[in-house]
Image (spheres, helix red, strand yellow):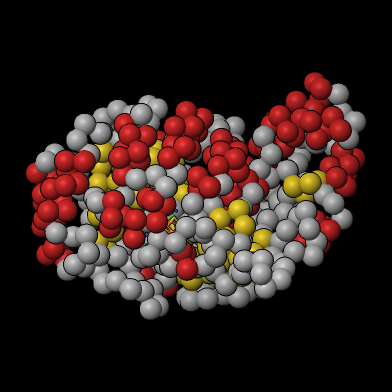
Amino acid sequence: MLERHKIHYLERIIVSKTPLIGKTSLIGKTSLIGKTSLIGLSKAQIITSLIDIGLNQKEAKMRSSQLWRWIYVNGVTDFTPMSNISKDFQKTLEQHFSLERPMLVSEQTSNDGTRKWLFRFFNKSDANAQPVDVETVYIPEKTRGTLCISSQVGCTLTCSFCHTGTQRLVRNLTSEELLSQILMARELLGDFPNGVRPSNGLVPNIEKRAITNLVLMGMGEPLYNYDNVKAAMLIASDGDAISLSKRRITLSTSGVVPYIEPAGEELGVMLAISLHAVRDDLRNELVPINKKWPIKDLLEACRNYPGLSNARRITFEYVMLKGINDSDTDAKELVRLLAKIPAKINLIPFNPWPNSPYECSDWERIEAFGDIVNRAGYASPIRTPRGRDIDAACGQLKSKSERIRKNKNNT
Ligand code: SAH
Ligand code: SF4
């Protein structure tokens, strides 16, 4: 039986000294002595790593399956609980590999039960590099719990309504860091065997798992970090690892057209497109990547999305900006544009952030817009803003990490 860490919760921020934090903060130190993290490695990569330290192919294969189970199903953070691995071999593994997680810097819990965590990751390949801070959000509902993970620290794109867009890209997150957000959340929500559910906030009334759905909708553009996102999602959806159904994983993109088809082909996850405008001139302003891949090209890629069907629709996200993109004419044009694409339209009330240049459309306007879309036969749920009081809602995420400039001209 695994001994789970007891985690203490405070109402607002914990810059805590919980056992988890003490443990995870070792991550920087172990990386300095050159250990490879096993988190984020495919089974094949683990096999290669084990052969490198002297195992034969057959044994390495068997061990890689055991290790995956311990890491992703049981959620261990060191080798000692691995009861089907001898003490001696545990020591060998310990010498070469690490399973450590990021540091938990803070946790905030919203009045509506949404949780926002700030995780600190140390750079494993460069001991002198600054650590980076990443926000991850958990949104509980009655029958499901959605984890929203970040794919980058900051973003290269500068969508004018998005807080993350005001933070320059610091770096891409590695597959280890993508998966570590999920592992940390599972730990903190008591999702591993013998885990302890938090006593404050709402955790859905689900017997087995607090996290039932995963969305790549945190900081960053996942399709600009494709290889790491791919590696991580293949592990998140693998039945031998985190085992989330691909139908319950949604990748949201601002429209990196060349990667849309590969994402469907290789990951098979659900796709969400941040559309937000129906005319190129306006979309160029709101979602500047539109200058590179305009609406026509984007929708063409959507029509060709592998596996698209009425049972597997694309979600189009549409942020409601007062007086900007919320007229009846916009709604009608939206319907026209999406003709023949199996789609669902998520109307997102704009979430404000400090000095944001927009206002959220009035509720009646959002409903009137939604009615037009609905009458055309598209489901158009209005997404209830969640976690606004702790700046955890869509588009409000931003960490304090900055890219260190080598010199003034290197921007
Ligand atoms: N980079 C990806 C995923 C992260 S953003 C993308 O752009 O799709 C996740 C979602 O939040 C996107 O639909 C984005 O357009 C939306 N969003 C960004 N800022 C927002 C804000 N201030 N209010 C509401 N939604 C916002
Ligand atoms: Fe980046 Fe998405 Fe924000 Fe645009 S909306 S700046 S792509 S995170």
**Viewer-side residue, 154 vs 148:** 154
Q: Residue shown at 55%/65% (left/top)? A: 168
Residue at the (43%, 67%) spot, across then down: 163
Above or below 59: residue 378: below
Instruction: Give residue 96's quadrant in the image.
Output: top right
Q: Position of residue 14 (x, y in %)?
A: 57, 75
Residue 183 location, x and y as percent? 59, 51
Residue at 76% over, 39% down: 83
Nearer-the-camera pick, 400 or 11: 400
For this orientation, the residue located farthest to the bottom is 355
Q: How many numbered marks have been drawn onto this rendered protein structure?
A: 0
Of 382 and 86, which appears nearest the observer? 382
Q: Kindly tell me whether residue 384 is visible in this rendering.
A: no
| Horizontal relation, residue 205 to residue 135: left or right | left
Q: Position of residue 110 (x, y in %)?
A: 40, 70
Instruction: Return the residue found at the far front.
Output: 409
Image vertical order of residue 41 relative to residue 306, above or below: below
Please state which of residues 394 and 161 is positioned toward the viewer in this rendering.
Answer: 161
On the rendered structure, is 276 left or right of 11?
Answer: left
Whether 397 is drawn above or below 180: the answer is below
Quadrant of the rendered image containing residue 24: bottom right
Which of the image's four quarters has the C terminus?
bottom right
Q: Residue at x 12, y 64 (%)?
A: 364
Query: As drawn, is 189 to the left or to the right of 375?
Result: right
Q: Can you see residue 391?
A: yes
**Rendered location of residue 204, percent (x, y):** 38, 54
Q: Quadrant of ligand 1?
A: bottom left
